[in-house]
Amino acid sequence: MRETYVAVAGVVATDPQVRTLDDGRQVMSFRVASTSRRFDNPSRQWVDGHTLWVKVTCWRELADNAAKCVRKRDRVVAWGRLHTEQWKGADGVTRSDLAMDAESLGHDLTFGVSVFERKRRTIDQRTLTDVPVVDPATGEIISVATGAPGPDAEGDPAPDIAAAAPPEPDEEFDELEEDEDEDGDDELEELGRGEALLATA
């Protein structure tokens, strides 16, 4: 089955409605009005075209986040799967409406500014240990205290490893001075040979 994904930019026309399902999932829905604009040649000005109405539905985390920042009359851009909803009215006539299961939703920054705040997820903290969590004999779960040593651990503190001491600064300077002295002696010897050659010439 092929799915149709579209992006709709418009105005939130109704107050967002948030519901919680029996399984704990949150659902948020609202209607978006998207009015096209076109340039009218006879009047030489921009005029409004037809208005497209789309029911936008957000699920799970998107619904939780959108409920905190999306309000009526906000300019938004929604992207998701487009489909139709059908129902029978009081007169027995079958009606249909465009609907979208949104996968992304945000404010339209063409008309204003927005500040993004990243949501931090809560992760269960687990302790890794060498001690088995299930008793192989009884099959019962063994409760392990945080920081308990494993079966191979002796419980003795780890020995301190002494770091290699850096060389003394005086020793470094002495080596540099010796090298410089040797280089200076070689240069003097070469200069003395050159002067001797000039004197005999």
Image (cartoon, rainbow, N blue to C red):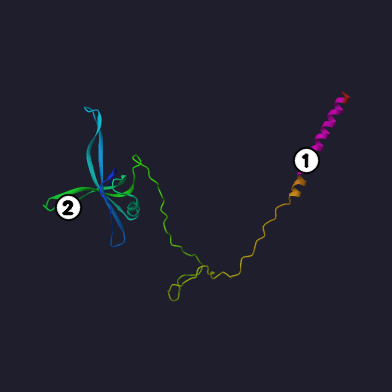
Highlighted magenta segment, given as a residue range: 176-198
Q: State left or right for residue 64 relative to residue 182.
A: left
Secondary structure under tag 2 reads strand
What x and y, as percent, mark residue 113? 37, 43
Label 2 crowd (10 A; few <14 / some 14-19 / many >=20)? few
- Point out the frontmost of discs 2 and 1: 2
Relative to 80, residue 143 above or below:
below
Relative to 196, residue 66 above or below:
below
Q: Quadrant of the C terminus?
A: top right
Relative to 136, residue 113 above or below:
above
Q: Residue at x 33, y 51 (%)?
A: 66
Q: Main secondary structure of the magenta part?
A: helix
Q: Amino acid at mark 1?
A: Glu
Secondary structure under tag 1 reads helix
Q: Residue at x 26, y 35 (%)?
A: 37
| Residue at numbered disc 2 | 87
Label 1 crowd (10 A; few <14 / some 14-19 / many >=20)? few
Q: Amino acid at mark 2?
A: Trp
Instruction: Reply yes or no: does residue 179 show up in magenta.
Output: yes
Please identify the quarter of the rendering in which residue 182 is found: top right
Instruction: Reply yes or no: does residue 71 show up in magenta.
Output: no
What x and y, as percent, mark residue 30? 26, 50
The first of marks 2 and 1 along the sequence is 2
Q: State left or right for residue 123 relative to residue 194.
A: left
Q: Nearer the viewer, residue 28 or 44?
A: 44
What x and y, as percent, mark residue 146? 50, 68
What x and y, as percent, mark residue 103? 32, 49
| Residue at numbered disc 1 | 180
Residue 15's disc number = none
